[in-house]
Amino acid sequence: MILLTGGTGYIGSHTAVELLQSGEEIVIADDFSNSNEEVLKRMETLTGKKIPFYQIDVKDKKALKKVFEDQAEPIRCVIHFAGFKAVGESVKEPVKYYRNNLDTTLSLLEVMQEKQVKQFIFSSSATLYGKSKGKAPFTEDEPDTGCTNPYGWTKWMIEQILQDVCVADPEFSAVMLRYFNPIGAHESGLLGERPNGIPNNLMPYITQVAIGKLDHLRVFGDDYDTPDGTGVRDYIHVVDLAKGHVAACDYIKEHKGAEVINLGTGVGYSVLDIVHAFEEANGIRIPYEIVERRAGDVATMYADASKARRLLDWKAEKDLTQMCRDSWRFEQML
Ligand code: UFG
């Protein structure tokens, strides 16, 4: 049995479905702070399974203990998705971010210690390479240069905590998955990303322009040192990312200690590449204007994805056209 905190969120919900379809038993703990009951229902429709679910705050140790105690089959592994993730908001409200992201992790680790559960998979981020002086593709052993915002620092701190836990307990295993830029949606159109308010991220912004909720895309800068001057990122289909977690759940059974692993495709696309791929895949024009650079953005960020291939026997399979089609299908079905 695998516990997913934040298992009804964008990445959590896709991972839950892939785990169930691969034959794993799961239980979800989520407070619905960035999702809702409808997502859970859709996950059940898709898999034809009733999913054990606890609407709790993961900071609440008492409630969390009950999740571990209630299960007939013991929980062997936890995938910790729950956390706040908006970069801009974290700059404005750092205390809220540190309190939430660190407290949920510490509560979880304390309860796991008490219940003798020793497998931990963590949603980390390529944001840890954001200040790097090196050049893409980034490997996991890129020198640590810290982060550019409180959200990133929470990921950095939690990685450090997990490294320390692995030193203290040689039986403990922690896999820290550094995600690049997940986009796309489940091909059924039932699951996808539902940002609150005006989206910060590129693909949800584009789909909202396509459907007419937003007027046009603002491209943040065209004077970067990249082939067309716009920012380059490693966009990965969310279902591929979910499958990376399934592979990590297998890997962690046999390996102890701490391991950091990039989940990306290893390929970079620019903002305008994405706009044009979306237009081509879906036959819709996306009007855009070039505006100032966005503070904190880097020119180019993509993964060296070879470690995931080596350790997890996993690689991303879906191409940009599928990412664009699936994102658009989900937006239309919302
Ligand atoms: N962009 C625009 N216009 C928009 C939104 C984005 O031009 O309206 C551009 C950005 O400048 C950037 C690219 O599109 O060049 C991607 O931007 P996103 O906001 O979609 O993604 P980021 O790469 O900035 O950040 C994402 C996640 C972070 C994570 C990071 C890791 O949002 O949580 O990837 O690399 F930390």
Image (tube, rainbow, N blue to C red):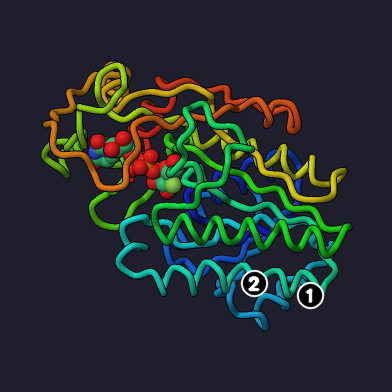
Marks 2 and 1 in Cβ contact (< 8 Å): no
User: What's the residue at 49%, 74% (across, down)?
Assistant: 99
| Residue 50: percent from left, percent from top | 65, 56
| Residue 316: percent from left, percent from top | 58, 26
48 relative position to 66: left or right: left
* Number of marks present in the image shown: 2
User: What's the residue at 82%, 64% (across, down)?
Assistant: 168
Where ligand 1 lies, by quadrant? top left
Q: Nearer the viewer, residue 180 or 134?
A: 134
Residue kind at label 2, given as amino acid type? Leu
Residue kind at label 1, given as amino acid type? Glu
What residue is shown with label 2?
A: 106
Taking 181 as reference, is 100 above or below it? below
User: What's the residue at 44%, 59% (across, down)?
Assistant: 151
**Callout 2: few (<14), some (14-19), or many (20+) C-alpha neighbours within 10 Å?**
some
Q: Is residue 251 visible?
A: yes
Quadrant where the N terminus lies?
A: bottom right
Residue 69: assigned label: 1
284 relative position to 13: left or right: left
| Residue 321: percent from left, percent from top | 40, 20
- Tell me the mark number nearer the camera, choosing from 2 and 1: 2
| Residue 54: percent from left, percent from top | 61, 70
Taking 225 as reference, is 328 above or below it? below
**Judging from the image, what secondary structure is the residue with disc 2 in?**
helix
